[in-house]
Image (cartoon, grey):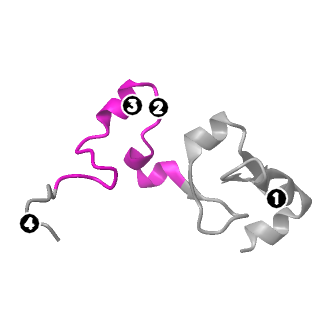
Amino acid sequence: MNDTTDQTSSCCGHTSHSSVESEGRPNLMGAAEDDMATCPVMEGRPVVKNIAEAAGLYRDYGGTRYWLCCAGCGPLFDADPQKYVAA
């Protein structure tokens, strides 16, 4: 590793992502834990709740809301929700 590497840089080489939000793009790195969920269909895929809701990528089942990572997960969840909520 090069000793002159800036240790404050992020994965994309920027030291700050505040300009992302100011440009109208969501800052996915800044989401708080309470704002995150895991897709029940694609286990392990993180989902930012408010972005999923704005895109209609959620289902309510058994009194609980489940957030989905993509449009392809909706029909799978709808076909057998019990399979995914039990996981």
Instruction: Please tell me whether mark 4 sits on a helix, a strand or a loop.
Output: loop
User: Which residue is more in the foreground, 20 or 30?
Assistant: 20
Along the horizontal axis of the image, is 38 left or right of 65? left
Name which residue lies at 8% across and 66% down: 3
Q: CA distance from mark 4 to mark 3?
A: 31 Å
The answer to if 67 sits in the magenta stretch is no
**Dot 4 or dot 1, earlier in sequence:** 4
Nearer the camera: disc 4 or disc 3: 4
Assess whether mark 2 and mark 1 are in contact (beta carbons under 8 angstroms): no
Q: Identify the residue under disc 2.
A: 25
Which amino acid is tagged 2? Arg
Q: Identify the residue under disc 1.
A: 77
**Dot 4 or dot 2, earlier in sequence:** 4
Nearer the camera: disc 4 or disc 1: 4
Which amino acid is tagged 4? Asp
CA neighbours of label 3 inside 10 A, class few (<14), some (14 to 19), many (20+): few
Instruction: Please tell me whether mark 2 sits on a helix, a strand or a loop.
Output: loop
Name which residue lies at 63% across and 43% down: 52
Q: Identify the residue under disc 4.
A: 3
Q: Position of residue 8 (x, y in %)?
A: 17, 53
The answer to if 13 sits in the magenta stretch is yes
Q: CA distance from mark 4 to mark 2?
A: 33 Å
CA neighbours of label 1 inside 10 A, class few (<14), some (14 to 19), many (20+): many
Q: Identify the residue under disc 3.
A: 21
**Dot 3 or dot 1, earlier in sequence:** 3
Q: Position of residue 21 (x, y in %)?
A: 39, 31
Name which residue lies at 57% across and 39% down: 50
Which amino acid is tagged 1? Phe
**Dot 4 or dot 3, earlier in sequence:** 4
Nearer the camera: disc 3 or disc 1: 3
Q: Within the image, what quadrant is residue 62 found in? A: bottom right
